[in-house]
Structures are given as C-alpha cells and as structure tokens.
Amino acid sequence: MSVASEYRAVVGLGNPGSRYLCTRHNIGFLVTDLIRSASGASDDEEFNTRLLSNVKSALRGELDQAGWSSRDERLEAPVTVGDWSASLIKPQAFMNRSGEPLRDFLAYKKIPISEVVVVHDEIDLPLGSVRVKVDGGEGGHNGLRSISSVCGGRAYARVRVGVGKPPEGSPMSKAEDGVAAWVLSRFDSEELPFVEELMVRSAQAVVCLAREGLRTAQNRFNR
C-alpha cells in the first residue's frame, strides 16, 4: 500500500552533452529518463512493465525526449505513478555545478531540500548494487558536494547506483586520474545486461521510496 509521499522532486545527476552520453557518471540521467518513460503508470505492475519495455532504449540514449522542458540550466519533466506525482530534474550544468540549477528550481517551486531524491553514480558500490539513504556525507562525489553546498544542506534522499571502481590491476586502477577516467567511460558490452537490470532496480527504488517510504525502500533494495 502506498503512503503519502514527501518527495516532490527527483534529480538525476550527470554531465550534459553527447560526449558524456551513457557513461558511468551519467547513470543518474539514464535512470531519470527511464522513470520518465514509465510515467502515467496506474500501479507498480504497469510501472515495472514499462520500465522493462524501455530500458534498452534508455541505456542507448534513444528514448523520446518529448515532455522535457529546458530552463535555467536544467531539463524538467513531470512524472506520475499511481497516486504519486513529482518533478524530474536533470541539471545541465556540469557535475561540479549540479546544485546551482537545482537551487533555482527549489526556490521557484518553494520545495525544501528534504523533499528531494538525488539519483547518482556510486563508485564505492559494485556494479549492480543499489542503496537508499537520507542525509550523510558526499563521499567525494562532486555533484552531491555541490547540492549540499548551495541547496540547504544534506537532508535529501539519495539512490546510490553502483558503478564500481576500475578493475584491480587495470591501467585506470593505477593512474592518478584513473577514477575520473573510469566514471567518464562507457559501459562495455559484457556489462550491459547488468546495467539494464541496475537501471530498472534503481528506478523501482526511487518510486518505492517516494510511494512507500524510506524504511520499505531500504528493506527492499539495500542488499
């Protein structure tokens, strides 16, 4: 059973531009696009069916972008699933300035940071893992650091989408800038089936959090 949601904005993090399309760092954009593609579902069953139908197109960056509006360095679109409705946001500033477009949106809509869910890549989780949390540190993530700095603190929800670290012994694992190169790289062909499943589970986690609350989402997805 759903409960009244306190979450009125879902923010997917990524970098704008075709150069960064479908990279690990842009998994937040991909998940947000996937959620948008399933908007209008009347219940969880229909939502899940739409996710599975659209995930391949989302991962390739081929979803229809109709319905997104552009303003003040952000893309914005409505989403509804059952009795829950919210705004989806994709900041169009680079990752280290993600908070600035979000700050403008929150001020315009008069929404506190506590009513925001941020979907972001997480190198400290293995590929395929999803974790839901509220508050806490940024773990070196520049997008989260920007949001915490300019949007009123850390009291927002996060759906942490595991993209892993460079494989041990690989050139990127040894290079000084290896982690940066890793998150800006695209998933390889062997990873794609796992990434599709990851995107679906991350989208489900966002909607579960919004419709059923933090504890239910953590019990269902934090494993």
Image (cartoon, grey):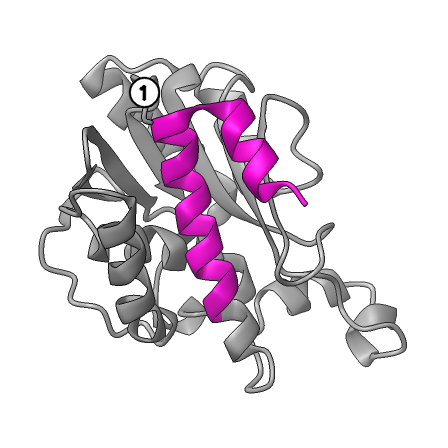
Q: Is residue 49 magenta?
A: no
Q: Which residue is mark 1?
A: 5
The C terminus lies in quadrant: top right
The image shows residue 114, relative to residue 18, as above or below, that is above
The image shows residue 147, relative to residue 177, as above or below, that is above
**Does the magenta stretch mainly form a helix, a strand or a loop?**
helix
Point 32% across, 26% down: residue: 2
The image shows residue 175, relative to residue 44, as above or below, that is below
Point 27% across, 68% down: residue: 54
Point 16% across, 61% down: residue: 65
* Kind of residue sitting beneath label 1: Ser
Badge 1 crowding class, 10 Å Cα cut-off, few under 14, some 14 to 19, many 20 or more, is some
Residue 45 is situated, as x and y percent measured from the top left of the image, at 28, 51
- The number of numbered discs placed on residues in the rendered structure image is 1
Q: Is residue 212 magenta?
A: yes
The N terminus lies in quadrant: top left
Residue 88 is situated, as x and y percent measured from the top left of the image, at 26, 40
The image shows residue 111, relative to residue 101, as above or below, that is above
Residue 53 is situated, as x and y percent measured from the top left of the image, at 27, 70
Q: Is any part of residue 218 visible from this angle?
A: yes
172 relative to 223 in the view: left or right = right
The quarter of the displayed image where residue 117 is located: top left
The quarter of the displayed image where residue 80 is located: top left
32 relative to 222 in the view: left or right = left
Magenta segment: 196-223
Residue 153 is situated, as x and y percent measured from the top left of the image, at 53, 16
Point 36% across, 13% down: residue: 112
